[in-house]
Amino acid sequence: MPSSTAHVATDAAARYAKQLASHLGRKVAVEDLPGDGYRLAFSAGEGTLTPEADRLVMRATASDAESLATVQDVLGRHLERFGQRRELVVTWQEDAS
């Protein structure tokens, strides 16, 4: 199953994770994870948001590369829009198989 991870530097990771989960939760199922994290179930795949002290770790998984790109786009685009003032940038790295 293809997957990728993005480490987004921010001192407000928990706030961004909550905002993103709340916003996307209007269209997709969201599950709370231990430690202020979230799992989002998209029709194309799954995303997880894990806040850390100095960054937000986002992980995308899907059954194929096209679906993975869709999950990455949705998560990345929305986070960058929410973090526009702080100039947040999402860069995805393919996970090792």
Image (tube, rainbow, N blue to C red):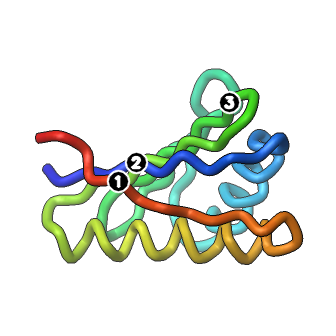
Image quadrant in which you'd find residue 45 = bottom left
Residue topped by disc 3? 52
The amino acid pointed to by label 1 is Gln
**Residue, far right:** 85
In depth, the one of 67 and 79 nearer the eye is: 79
Against 19, residue 57 (above or below) is above
Residue topped by disc 2? 5
The x, y position of residue 5, in whole percent, is 40, 48
Which residue corresponds to the image point at 61% horizontal and 22% vertical from the top-left? 34
Image quadrant in which you'd find residue 71 = bottom left
Image quadrant in which you'd find residue 46 = bottom left
How far is disc 3 from disc 1 in space, using C-alphas?
Answer: 18 Å
The x, y position of residue 14, in whole percent, is 77, 40
Pointer 1 with pointer 2, Cβ within 8 A? yes
Q: Mark 3, mark 1: which one is toward the viewer?
A: 1
The amino acid pointed to by label 3 is Glu
In depth, the one of 85 and 70 nearer the eye is: 85
The amino acid pointed to by label 2 is Thr
Residue topped by disc 1? 93
Which residue corresponds to the image point at 31% horizontal and 73% vertical from the top-left? 69
The x, y position of residue 72, in whole percent, is 42, 67
Which residue corresponds to the image point at 70% horizontal and 48% vertical from the top-left? 17
